Amino acid sequence: MYAIFENGSKQYKASVGDLIKVEKLDAAVGATVEFPVVLTADEKGIQVGAEVEKVKVVAEVVSQGKEKKIIVFKYKAKKNERKKQGHRQPYTQIKVVSIGAAKKPAKAKKPEAAEDKAE
């Protein structure tokens, strides 16, 4: 089974256990993050749209880092204009823990309400 999820206006393909580099997230190493799913596919078929509204990709933050440096060189011919600039894109590496429906916290029943109805 795999899922396509969205983060930072980009889409990523994920299976359980995958290590993925995504846009920098404001989360500590070891924290758990959830991403909304756009598409899921398994042996039953492909699901999109309303079928996957409640499905989430749950991942654990493994590390924070920066990519290799790239050189951005701009120049205009015959004008003696040159600009050399470097850039290192920050990223967050995550490990996919599970793909499935979002878990809702269970509501605690009030025992007082049950006693009132019994009387």
Image (cartoon, rainbow, N blue to C red):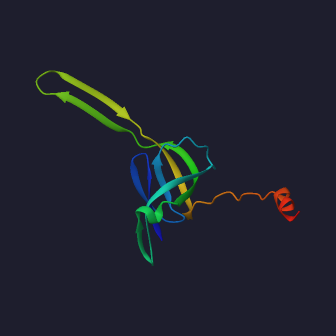
Which of 70 and 51 lies nearest the eye of the viewer? 51
Residue 27 against residue 20 in the figure, above or below: above
Residue furthest to the left in view is: 78
Query: In percent of the image, x 56 and y 56: which residue is there?
Result: 59
Which of 114 and 67 lies nearest the eye of the viewer? 114
Dividing the image into 4 quarters, which one contains the C terminus?
bottom right
Query: In percent of the image, x 54 and y 44: which residue is there?
Result: 64
Position in image of residue 22 (x %, y %): 46, 49
Left or right for 113, reference 10: right
Residue furthest to the right in view is: 119
Residue 103 against residue 67 in the figure, above or below: below
Residue furthest to the top in view is: 80
Left or right for 84, reference 75: right
Which of 119 and 11 lies nearest the eye of the viewer? 119
Left or right for 25, reference 86: right
Which of 33 and 76 lies nearest the eye of the viewer? 33
User: In the rendered image, which quarter is residue 49 located in?
Assistant: bottom left
Residue furthest to the bottom in view is: 43
Residue 74 against residue 49 in the figure, above or below: above
Query: In percent of the image, x 78 and y 59: which residue is there?
Result: 109
Q: How many labels does the image show?
A: 0
Query: In percent of the image, x 83 and y 62: which residue is there?
Result: 117
Position in image of residue 8 (x %, y %): 43, 45
Position in image of residue 60 (x %, y %): 59, 54
Position in image of residue 61 (x %, y %): 58, 50
